[in-house]
Amino acid sequence: MKKSDLVRWLVLSISLPSRPASTVRVRLWRALKDLGVGSLRDGVSVLPATDSARAAFENLARDVTTESGTAWLLDLPAQADDVEQALTGLFDRAADYADLAQASAQLAGELPKLDEVGARRRLRQLDKALAEVERVDFFPGKSREEMRAAYAALEAEVNRRFSPQEPTTAQRAIAPLALADYRGRAWATRRHLWVDRLASAWLIRRHIDTEAHFLWLDSPADCPPDALGFDFDRAVFTHALDQDGERVTFEVLLASFGLGADLGLSRLAALVHYLDVGGLPVGEAAGLEAVLAGLRAGCPDDDALLAAASPVFDALHLHFSTPDN
């Protein structure tokens, strides 16, 4: 088979009835926008030829014919160089990355006026928006690299300002541990608790070591040699990268002690992960973040904060343990 015979592009040509329901046209427009199609002309869309693109176009074609319209899905082989360049240019996301770069610069300039909750919420929103552009960036290049670098610098600045000793994520295996070997121990983490450390401390006391004694450190260097450190670099339990991706400390503790089968804990882990490092949004995130921010503002120290937040995590665990919730 010659290179020119290879299917490189998929073209979907659709025509709706002269007076379709407005909801049909809007639904179709939204679906095409979500796919990130290039437009050859009104009613003619193109995507790079992938299995997922073909399946999506086939679904849209069926929807159009169901609404008494017509749809043609065509395979387009590799074209002459100038045509290929023009087709590829339909998917140039430089303007989208430029908008994100502007939003990143705006957030960087506003950091001195924001509290930690507001800054991290804005950072997660930016991360989500960047992921959406990357999802439909079929020909990534310099613009994506520059925006990723800008986001990494902004994230580092947020951590430097609000959590200067935030742990880095290291690639390592997570070994299974026996709960019986971790009873009545001293556990240590950085003071001024926030989501991951606070949830991890709750998890330790409720599900790992009910007799745990906590030490809140001014610096990780202050961790006693006999204490079990968590959520700082070189701690016994901290962020890790393994075959399942990045795990925050709460997730590392779950995996280490074989607690991942608990539905409530695994769903709570997704919530903690999102609030700590971003990723897939969780519906309860904004509510939990607001509650914890209020508790932290009203508690005199970390012992009081853990005591006040524990019933919140108890309630979430119970709620998440019900499959229908």
Image (cartoon, grey):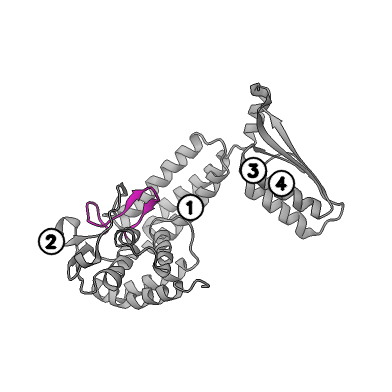
**Majority secondary structure of magenta residues:** loop
Q: Residues within 10 Å of mark 4 (few under 14, many from 20)?
A: some
Q: Residue 53's mark?
A: 3
Q: Amino acid at mark 3?
A: Ala
**Marks 2/1: CA–CA distance:** 41 Å
Of pointers 3 and 2, the one earlier in the residue sequence: 3
Q: Amino acid at mark 4?
A: Glu
- Give the labeled residue for mark 1: 126
- Give the labeled residue for mark 2: 226
**Front one among 54 and 309:** 54
Of pointers 1 and 4, the one earlier in the residue sequence: 4
Query: Is there a contact, CB below 8 Å, between mark 2 and mark 1?
Result: no
Viewer can see residue 216? no
Q: Amino acid at mark 1?
A: Leu
- Give the labeled residue for mark 4: 58
Front: mark 2 or 4: 4
**Marks 3/4: CA–CA distance:** 8 Å
**Front one among 297 and 45:** 45
Q: Position of residue 268 (x, y in %)?
A: 41, 67
Q: Secondary structure at mark 3?
A: helix
Of pointers 2 and 1, the one earlier in the residue sequence: 1
Q: Position of residue 50 (x, y in %)?
A: 62, 39
Q: Which residues are magenta?
A: 231-249
Looking at the image, residue 207 lies above or below residue 169: below
Q: Residues within 10 Å of mark 1 (few under 14, many from 20)?
A: some
Of pointers 3 and 4, the one earlier in the residue sequence: 3
**Marks 3/2: CA–CA distance:** 55 Å
Of pointers 2 and 4, the one earlier in the residue sequence: 4
- Answer with left or right where residue 180 lies relative to residue 99: left
Of pointers 3 and 1, the one earlier in the residue sequence: 3
**Marks 3/1: CA–CA distance:** 26 Å
